Amino acid sequence: PVPPTHTHSNMAGDRIPAVEHQGQTLPTEAKEPVDLDSDLGGTVLTPSYLAELLDQGRLDREKLEGSIRIEAAAPLQIDPRDHCEKEMLFRNQAFHEVGNWLRISGLESEAGQKLNGRLGRVVAAAAAATAANNNNTKGGRLAVEVAGEKKLLRPECLQPLADNERLHLVRLFCRGDRENGARSEIWPLKLVIDRPSEVCSFSSRVGVRIHVTRIESDRELNKDEDFENPWLSHLMIDAQTGATPLPWHRRPGAALAWREDGGILETKDICLLLCFIDKLLPRYRSEEDPVDVEKEVTQEAFEFFRMDEMRAAEGDEQERGVWWGDHGFNI
């Protein structure tokens, strides 16, 4: 349901609810379709008229949902390469980065000793943690969440997880999160591996199975749009149809993306895969030049795309060289 945001007068002078659509006011109780200028073209149906069409069998629900999924799979408005560049500029991939899980050790106070050996997740860097607590005497400490409680701990009391118990993954933020896009993080393997997940269709076809697991947002979400996640909806596009499956196409919330084989997965890997998907998306709806999935969505095709991206970065270092960094990809 669309919440009413305005009122509209009908011919009898009654005031009825209306909603905004692309800058134009649209009555929610109109009984006929209303044509509006739209980049997508076509006709906009009001909620009541849409319900009437569905009840009378004049509109097929499955076809309607299919068109919505295809619309959700339109190319991303922001180039993932730009986001990748920002992460490489502002995150140094140290174990103490925000979002990473660490093991607490070396605390000497009576209360602190009870925390030794436990796992905690860094939720704020030193400067932000100190400012949030207005405590200058604890400058340089990190805000770490332990079993739902935040503690200010010195970096030397936080140790990285062992190789066999950590998972390098990517967090995909929804609109209501404090961050946006994606971020490389390190989580305990045991906290991720047993959660319900689904495999990304495109990733399995290009040679690396990436699982996606829904998680709680890092803050309370109150509006429907807070749960929207364009990056996640794109990542879960069906390689056969070019459409996003229903569980993922609207308001899927935040999620973690991780490799089935336990290998390293970073933001730049997700960005590269999204760029590959976006390059093909327009042709899923083309009658003249449709995508040949069996030939164009393969490990070989993805490898060619990856090499082409790297060659472009080398050929135009100022424009693209910082996108992917100097260490290649993990997929």
Image (cartoon, grey):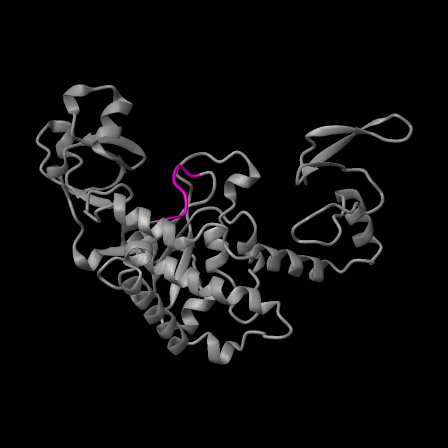
Residue drawn 12% across the image and 28% down it: 110
Instruction: Give coordinates of residue 52: x percent, y percent.
Output: 82, 49
| Type of secondary structure dominating the magenta stretch | loop
Q: Is residue 266 above or below residue 20?
A: below
Region rendered in magenta: 177-182
Rendered view: 305 above or below 31: below
The N terminus - image quarter: top right
**With respect to residue 109, does 290 lie above or below?**
below
- Residue nearer the viewer, 313 or 219: 313
Instruction: Write down the quadrant of residue 63 in the picture.
Output: bottom right
Q: Is residue 187 visible?
A: yes
> Residue drawn at (47%, 41%), measured in percent from left and top?
175
Q: Residue 193 versus residue 29: which sits nearer the camera?
A: 29
Asked whether residue 271 is drawn in magenta, I would say no
Figure quadrant of residue 81: bottom left
Q: Residue furthest bottom?
A: 295
Give the side of residue 132 with respect to residue 104, left or right: right
* In this rendering, position of residue 67 left or right of residue 303: right
Location of residue 46 in the rendering, given as x and y in whole percent from the top left corner: 76, 44
For the point 27% across and 64% down, the residue is 314
Q: Is residue 173 left or right of residue 110?
A: right
